[in-house]
Each structure stands twice: as C-alpha cells, then as structure tokens.
Amino acid sequence: MAEDNVVYVGTKPTMNYVLAVTTQFTNNPKEVVIKARGRAISRAVDVAEIVRRRFNTDAKVKDIKISTEDLKTEEGGTIKVSSIEITLEK
C-alpha cells in the first residue's frame, strides 16, 4: 500500500485527523491506515470511529494491528512504546 494513504495521529485536535482521513477517502483509495503511538492511541481510535459513524458510513475496519516499539532516549537507553495501526476500507 502507498505511504500516501497513511495518517499519523499525534497531539493535534481529533477533527484535524478526521479531516485528513476523509480527504484521503475522497481521493478514492480503497484503504486508509491510521497510525499512532503511546498516548495518541486513544485519539486514533476516536478518529476511526468518528470517520466510520459520521463521515464515511460505508467505511469498515479491515484490520487492527498492535505492537510495541523500542525507542532510543536522549540518554542512550531504550523505552518501550505501544503502537496501533487501524486500517479502514471502503
């Protein structure tokens, strides 16, 4: 799948990401992937549900992947951060 169809969720307001996903669907991709890490995971789930229930009611959750990533800290150590990928399809 093209990297163009990926929306990375961070600290911006939820509706910014809803708009990004909806815009991707208007460009006619069959799938859009919503990715988030750490505290943004709950926002990513909110984005997926708002898109499915309000804006693109024909969109369905195709796949959900969860994992843990090792990130390097500034001190040279590593920390584990949870991540999620939610794939929506038309």
Image (cartoon, rainbow, N blue to C red):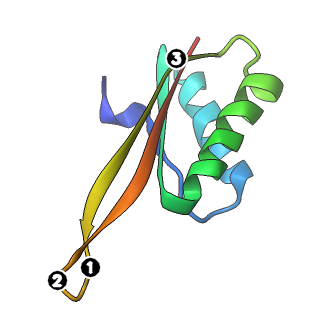
Q: Residue furthest bottom?
A: 75
- Judging depth in this view, the residue of 72 and 56 nearest the camera is 72
Q: Residue at x 67, y 52 (%)?
A: 16
Q: Give residue 13's quadrant in the image.
A: bottom right
Image coordinates of residue 11 in percent, x first then y, are: 59, 65
**Residue denoted by label 1:** 73
Q: Is residue 45 above or below residue 59?
A: below
The image shows residue 61, relative to residue 47, as above or below, that is above
Q: What crowding class fits label 3: few (fewer than 14 Cα within 10 Å), some (14-19), or many (20 or more)? A: few
Mark 2, Cα crowd under 10 Å, few <14 / some 14-19 / many 20+, is few
Residue in view at x 76 percent, y 16 percent: 57
Distance from label 3 to label 2 (Cα)? Answer: 43 Å
Residue type indicated by callout 2 = Gly
User: How far is the residue under mark 1 from the one under mark 2?
Assistant: 5 Å
Q: Residue at x 24, y 85 (%)?
A: 74
Within 10 Å of the Cα at label 1, are there few (<14), some (14-19), or many (20+) other Cα atoms? few
- Measured as percent of width and height from the top left, residue 17 is found at 62, 47
Instruction: Give the residue drawn at x 39%, y 59%.
Output: 81
- 87 or 21: nearer the eye? 87
Instruction: Find residue 76 and name its label.
Output: 2
Tell which circle, 1 or 3, labels the residue nearer the N-terminal end: 3
Asked whether disc 1 touches disc 2, contact meaning CB atoms under 8 Å apart, the reply is: yes
* Front of the two marks 3 and 2: 2
Q: Determine which of the numbered discs, if any, sits on residue 84 in the image.
A: none
Q: Amino acid at mark 1?
A: Thr
Q: At label 3, which amino acid type do we have? A: Asn
Q: Which residue is mark 3?
A: 28
